[in-house]
C-alpha cells in the first residue's frame, strides 16, 4: 500500500511549539539532550506496552472509591474512542512512538537537518519478523548513533532512519501515523512550559 507523510510540513510547527514552550531558550537544547529526550519517549512506549494498556487511549480520570481518587494510570478509567474525551491527553504505545517522532522532527528542524518526505510502498511484510522490543532497541540505537556521531550527515541519516522505522511501525499496527502525530501536536500546543 502506497503511503506518504510530509515530514517537512510537520517539522516547522513542531519546532515552533517547542521553542514557544522553552525547550530551545538560552542554548538549552543540544543534539545530545534532544536525543536523550527522544529515547525517553521510546522508554515510555515500552512502559505502556509492558503495562498491557491499549495502544491508543485517553485517560478520562481516576477510578474513585471511599479511599479517594489515586492519581496513577493503573487506577484510571480509560477510553479507546476518540469522541468520548475531547481535550484529554492521548496515551498509549502508539502515542509515545508518535511523541518520539515529534521530538525527532523538532531536533532536525532546530539544527537545520532535512527530514525529507517519507513515501513508499509500506506493505504487510515491511517489518516482518521484527518484534516490538527489537523495534524499540533499533529506535534507541539509531538515536544514540545520531547523538554520538560528529558527522552531520550521519546524524541526519540516523534520525531520519529512526523516524521512518517509527512511522512504518505505526502504519503496520493499523494507525494513520500522521493523524496520531497531529493529534499529539494539537494536545502539546496547550501544555505547560517544557512540556509538549
Image (spheres, grey):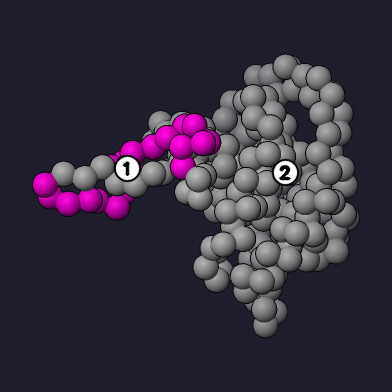
Q: Position of residue 107 (x, y in %)?
A: 73, 60
Give the magenta-colored segment's residue range. 66-85
Q: Residue at x 75, y 22 (%)?
A: 126
Q: Secondary structure at mark 1?
A: strand
Q: Nearer the viewer, residue 168 or 4?
A: 4
> Crowdedness of circle 1 by 10 Å Cα count: few (<14), some, many (20+)?
some
Name the residue beneath numbered marker 2: 162
> Crowdedness of circle 2 by 10 Å Cα count: few (<14), some, many (20+)?
many
Left or right for 106, reference 64: right
Q: Secondary structure at mark 2?
A: helix
Quarter-of-image position of residue 170: top right
* Quadrant into which the N terminus falls: top right
Q: Position of residue 99 (x, y in %)?
A: 61, 49
Q: Is residue 145 magenta?
A: no
Name the residue beneath numbered marker 1: 76
Q: Nearer the viewer, residue 40 or 116?
A: 116
Left or right for 155, reference 62: right
Q: Residue furthest top?
A: 124
* Quadrant into which the C terminus falls: bottom right
Gap between marks 2 and 1 measured at Cα = 32 Å
Considering only order in the chain, which callout, 1 or 2, is on the residue closer to the N terminus?
1
Q: Is residue 54 visible?
A: yes
Q: Residue at x 73, y 17 (%)?
A: 125
Q: Is residue 137 visible?
A: no
Q: Residue at x 57, y 30 (%)?
A: 132
Disc number lying in front (2 or 1):
1
Q: Position of residue 61 (x, y in %)?
A: 34, 47
Q: Is residue 78 magenta?
A: yes
Quarter-of-image position of residue 139: top right
Q: Position of residue 92 (x, y in %)?
A: 50, 39
Total of numbered circles in the picture? 2
Q: In the picture shown, does residue 189 fall above or below 8?
A: below
Amino acid at each position: 500500500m502506497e503511503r506518504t507523510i510530509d515530514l517537512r510540513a510537520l517539522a516547522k510547527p513542531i519546532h515552533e511549539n517547542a521553542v514557544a514552550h522553552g525547550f530551545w531558550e538560552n542554548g538549552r537544547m543540544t543534539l545530545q539532550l534532544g536525543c536523550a529526550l527522544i529515547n525517553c519517549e521510546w522508554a515510555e512506549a515500552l512502559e505502556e506496552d509492558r503495562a498491557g494498556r491499549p495502544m491508543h487511549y485517553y485517560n478520562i480520570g481516576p477510578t474513585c472509591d471511599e479511599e479517594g481518587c489515586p492519581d496513577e494510570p493503573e487506577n484510571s478509567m480509560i477510553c479507546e474512542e476518540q469522541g468520548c474525551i475531547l481535550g484529554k491527553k492521548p496515551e498509549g504505545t502508539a502515542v509515545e512512538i508518535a511523541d518520539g517522532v515529534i521530538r525527532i522532527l523538532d531536533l532536525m528542524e532546530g539544527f537545520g537537518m532535512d527530514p525529507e518526505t517519507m513515501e513508499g510502498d509500506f506493505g504487510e511484510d515491511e517489518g516482518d519478523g521484527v518484534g516490538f522490543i527489537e523495534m524499540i532497541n533499533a529506535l534507541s540505537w539509531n538515536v544514540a548513533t545520531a547523538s554520538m556521531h560528529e558527522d552531520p550527515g550521519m546524524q541526519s541519516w540516523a534520525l531520519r532512519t529512526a523516524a521512518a522505522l517509527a512511522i512504518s511501525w505505526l502504519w503496520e499496527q493499523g494507525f494513520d501515523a500522521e493523524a496520531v502525530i497531529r493529534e499529539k501536536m494539537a494536545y502539546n500546543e496547550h501544555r505547560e512550559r517544557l512540556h509538549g
